[in-house]
Structure formats: C-alpha cells, structure tokens
Image (cartoon, grey):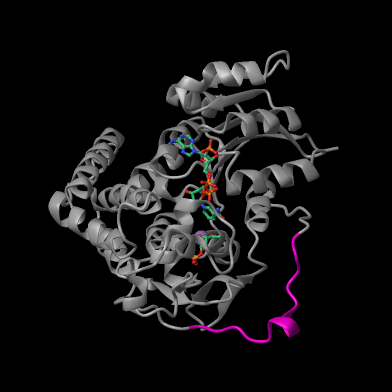
Amino acid sequence: MTLKKSVSVFGVTGSIGTSTVDILKSHADKYTVDAVTAYRNVDALANIAKELNAQCAVIGDPALYQDLSDALANTGIEVGAGENALIEAAARPSDIVIAAIVGAAGLKPTLAAIRRGARVGLANKETLVCAGALMTAEVAKHNATLIPVDSEHSAIFQVLEDRADSQVDRILLTASGGPFREWSLDQMRSVTRAQALAHPNWEMGAKISIDSATMMNKGLELIEAWHLFPVAEEKIEIVVHPQSVVHSMVEYCDGSVLAQLGSPDMRTPIAYALAWPERIKVDVPRLDFATIGGLNFQKPDAKRFPALRLARQALQEGGTLPTVLNGANEVAVAAFLEDRIGFLQIAEIVETMMEKIGSQPLTSLDQVFETDACVRRETAVYIAAE
Ligand SMILES: NC(=O)C1=CN([C@@H]2O[C@H](COP(=O)(O)OP(=O)(O)OC[C@H]3O[C@@H](n4cnc5c(N)ncnc54)[C@H](OP(=O)(O)O)[C@@H]3O)[C@@H](O)[C@H]2O)C=CC1
Ligand SMILES: CC(=O)[C@@H](O)[C@H](O)COP(=O)(O)O
Ligand SMILES: [Mn+2]
C-alpha cells in the first residue's frame, strides 16, 4: 500500500484550480488536500474546501476574512486571509503544491513552497517570466522539484528526459495562433472583449485567454521554456499549430523529433505533475486521428503579433526587462478587459513601457517585487493619460 500524498492548490477556484479539483476527487485514494486558496471568490473556495476535506482555506483579499470564516464555521477547516496568509499556507508541509494563481501575485507563495523543498506543479508561468533565474536558483538551493503544468512545457518535459543541451537541436513550442490567427491587422483594430476571450481550443481564465489572442502567451512561454530547459534561446522556435493537438516537440541532434500529443484538456498535464514520475488515469476525450484528419503547422506572423518580438527581446536583453514586459502586459490586459484600451494597444503599451523603463541587471527577488510594483504604477499612469 502506498502512502497518500498531500496536495495544496493555489488558485483553486480558477480554470487550472478546478481541473485540479476534478483529478483530486477522482483519485481520493492517492491524494489528501492540505491548503486551498482563492482571491475573492469566497463561496467557491468554501465549497471546494468542504468538498475536498481540506485542512486550510485562504482568501487573498484580507477584507474577506470574516466572510470565509462564516462560510467555514463548524467545519474544523483553518481559515486565513491576505498575502501573508497565502505565503504561510505555501510554507505548510504538503507534498505537492499546484501553483495556479494568475499573474505575478503567484510569485511569493510559489517561492515559499520552493523554499521548503516542495514539489511544485507550476502553472503560474509569470513566476518564471518575472524572476526565472532567481527562482531556479532557489529550486536548486532548497532541493525543490519544479514540474511544469503549462501544456507545452509539460510536453517538452515529457519528451526531453535528461538529455544534455548538446543533443538537443531545437525545441518547437507550438502555438494555436489564438482566435485572430487569420485576421488582418485592420480587423484586429476593432476586436471586442468577447471575441478575444473566445479561444478556439482551450477553456481558460480571462488573462491567459487575452494573452493567447495577442500571442503574448507564447512570448511568456518562450521565456518560461528557457528557464525550465537548458537550451540556448535561439534553439527555441515557435510554430503555429491551429489544432493544439501536438503540445510541443523536441528535435534531437540525430534528426529525431519527439512530440507529446493529446486532447486540449489541462487535466492531462496537471495529472502528470501530480503523479510524476508515474501516470494516473484521467478521463479526458481521447484523440481520434481519423476524425482529426490533418495537423497543420505554419510560421507565426511577427507583424500582426508584435508580442512575440517583444518577449524574445526581453529574453535576449535579460535583467529586469522580462519583469517589465510582464507587469506592463498584466496592466494592459486588465485595461483591455475593462474596455479602457483597444486590443492592438496591449502590445503597443508593453513596448512603450519596455522602452521607457528599460532593464537593470537582476540582483535580488526584492528588486523583482519593486520593479513589478513600479511598472504597474507607471503603466497605469500611462494608460490613464492616453
Ligand atoms: N487555464 C489554463 O488552461 C492555463 C493556465 N496557465 C496559467 O495558470 C495560471 C492560472 O490560470 P487560470 O487558471 O486560467 O486563471 P483563472 O483566472 O481562471 O484563475 C486564477 C486563480 O487565481 C486566483 N487569484 C487571482 N488573483 C489573485 C491574487 N491577487 N492573489 C491570490 N489569488 C489570486 C483566483 O481567485 P478568484 O477566483 O477568487 O479570483 C483564481 O483562483 C496563469 O498563470 C496561467 O497563465 C497555464 C497553462 C494553461
Ligand atoms: C493550455 C495552455 O497551455 C495554454 O497556454 C495554451 O497553450 C494557450 O494557447 P495558445 O497556444 O493559443 O497560446
Ligand atoms: Mn501553454
């Protein structure tokens, strides 16, 4: 009989969070649940905490402490609220932490889990974009384990094994191209919020859906891949693959290309991060190749999707530039979702902030937090003045 593993889920009310809940419920013989967290969604958090028999529930917004306490009264579930409570929850001794908070808000709790040597299933790509080198150094220092949950990075992780950089010729990061893959720049000028949120293949939270539509998601994933896998930046290529069936590929020095394929359903990579190095059964739709018929691949269009160029520039220049790119993008995406700016302005604003703020050598995590806060302030001021 194998011992059950305890799991904490940060961002449990979100798209990745609820897919994780689904797997944990169907494998209750293998996993217990320690901490679950959300930001403002008290009712959903309380219901999930009760359903999973969690030990502890934390709400990010400190003003909602009493609401959560009331919702969990007489359950025996510990309750916390605010950023420090999120960090404390990550420091609790669960075996596995699924890091699925959206945006740079996920950085500090993820860091706390890494610092106690946990296994972290990382969905929160912004953590690696903002502070990749510092985070991977923390992983090594504390003997933590980082398992990518992002579908492309899970694919690469599954086919890369422990190959040395010298044996890898290319990492081929696949991109759906998003809802505007075939739209002209003129058409893209008047994109609505609803059109941008309608991803062709994946059901995801609002922020990453907009990132997919601008293809900034693939830019963030380029930076994420570079931090996760030991290859030179120029060996990471982005290829548009509209079906999102091939989740990414690795080309080796002998010409072999290994790919991981599957239905576009995040329960597969989440389950892999939970069960690694084993696999567990997941009830996802299976691929029917005869019905799919064909798989297509094409070059991304850097003119219509400037976010790709900006992300590669941030990766090449390094320092705090990826932090600037990420912070400006988060603020611009929020402004687009509130109908305060147009779709094409998102990348324009990111580019302006990268030029305005520039890059400093990366020295400490405190510097990352300060840069992130400064970029957010300046981007908000810039948007308000536009
Ligand atoms: N969705 C997907 O398929 C994929 C997502 N990812 C990455 O995973 C992460 C999560 O994405 P997704 O699940 O789509 O996002 P969602 O918006 O669906 O969920 C976000 C979660 O984070 C919580 N949250 C939001 N803001 C804060 C904050 N300031 N402090 C604490 N918690 C917060 C939300 O709580 P509340 O509900 O209370 O607001 C919610 O639980 C992102 O980094 C994304 O890029 C990667 C690959 C695929
Ligand atoms: C499911 C997942 O991993 C997302 O990051 C997805 O890849 C988004 O699709 P795009 O390829 O359109 O960015
Ligand atoms: Mn992805």
Residue reaching furthest top? 74
Q: Is residue 291 magenta?
A: yes
Look at the image and give the residue range highlighted in magenta.
284-297
Q: Main secondary structure of the magenta part?
A: loop
Residue reaching furthest left? 356
Q: How many marks?
A: 0
Tell me residue 300's x, y (percent): 39, 78
Q: Is residue 276 magenta?
A: no
Horizontal side, residue 308 vs residue 144: left or right: left
Identify the residue at horizontal 32%, vertical 47% (top origin): 331
Asked whether residue 229 is in view, the answer is: no
Depth check, front residue: 120 or 232:
120
Horizontal side, residue 328 vs residue 20: left or right: left
Identify the residue at horizontal 53%, vertical 51% (top origin): 205
Q: Quadrant of residue 83?
A: top left
Identify the residue at horizontal 39%, vertical 60% (top origin): 226
Q: Quadrant of residue 72?
A: top right
Tell me residue 200's x, y (percent): 56, 69
Q: Is residue 300 above or below residue 3?
A: below
Residue reaching furthest right? 1
Depth check, front residue: 63 or 254:
63
Tell me residue 351's x, y (percent): 22, 60
Tell me residue 357's x, y (percent): 15, 49
Horizontal side, residue 372 vs residue 207: left or right: left
Horizontal side, residue 275 vs residue 342: left or right: right
The quarter of the picture where the N terminus appears is top right
Asked whether residue 63 is in view, the answer is: yes
Q: Quadrant of residue 7?
A: top right
